[in-house]
Image (spheres, helix red, strand yellow):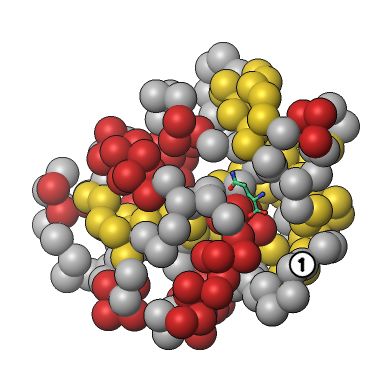
Amino acid sequence: MTTPAAATPVVGVLALQGDVREHLIALASADAVARPVRRPEELAEVDGLVIPGGESTTISKLATLFGLMEPLRARVRDGMPVYGSCAGMIMLADKILDPRSGQETVGGIDMIVRRNAFGRQNESFEAAVEVRGVEGAPVEGVFIRAPWVESVGAEVEVLAEHAGHIVAVRQGNALATSFHPELTGDHRVHALFVEMARGNRRAGSL
Ligand code: GLN
């Protein structure tokens, strides 16, 4: 028997570094139960996970230090819905064009990303972005030292471009954006992800 409460997915936010709080708020507004995730046991209990923006080198090092890198790879490989924004997009890339030394990724999306791609002149800016799968007006994209996607494999769906560069992609249950929808108060991208997580809700959770 399904009740509305039983359909509510539990969505974690990887809480090692970055704008964790904003994602928790956006997810709660998009009808998910949102929780910070810092330990492998917490990762095991979520139906989906957001990897926030911040600094991908730091997130990578902390994920290794906290024993989360392998569990993250395993869950993504198993098809857990995962959404990465900005540094989180970098974490989901199978390959980084210009990694810092020791920088690793979780992977999951067959793409090559370029870090800080928009250059010094354009360190941060806002732009209206049409995102496939998000109905209505374009999303207000907030780009902060953002990556872009240099190239994608055949399995990757391009969801958005800005200035001729790919800025949102999806491969199966993995979603990534160069920009930060958690900073705008418009929760349509989070709602899209919560729907992906709802599809993965494990029997027995909530
Ligand atoms: N430039 C950062 C990095 O390479 C990403 C910036 C962000 O997440 N806002 O990790």
Rendered position, 137 above or below 143 = above
Q: Quadrant of residue 48?
A: bottom left
Residue at the spot x=27%, y=80% of the render? 41
Q: Amino acid at mark 1?
A: Pro
Residue under label 1, please give it: 99
Q: Is residue 171 visible?
A: no
Name of the residue lying farthest toward the top:
137
Quadrant (top left/top right/bottom left/bottom right) for the N terminus: bottom left
Q: Nearer the viewer, residue 79 or 73?
A: 73
Q: Nearer the viewer, residue 189 or 56?
A: 56
Q: Nearer the viewer, residue 88 or 133?
A: 88
Residue at the spot x=67%, y=25% of the render? 125
Residue 121: image location, x then y, percent: 81, 29
Rendered position, 17 above or below 145 = below
Q: Nearer the viewer, residue 145 or 168?
A: 145
Q: Quadrant of residue 137?
A: top right
Residue 30: image location, x then y, percent: 32, 36
Residue 65: image location, x then y, percent: 46, 82
Residue at the spot x=17%, y=70% of the render? 204
Are there few (<14), some (14-19), or many (20+) residues within 10 Å of tag 1?
some
Residue at the spot x=48%, y=73% of the render? 62
Left or right position of 66 against 171: left
Q: Secondary structure at mark 1?
A: loop
Rendered position, 58 above or below 135 = below
Q: How many marks?
A: 1
Q: Is residue 135 visible?
A: yes
Q: Quadrant of residue 148?
A: top right
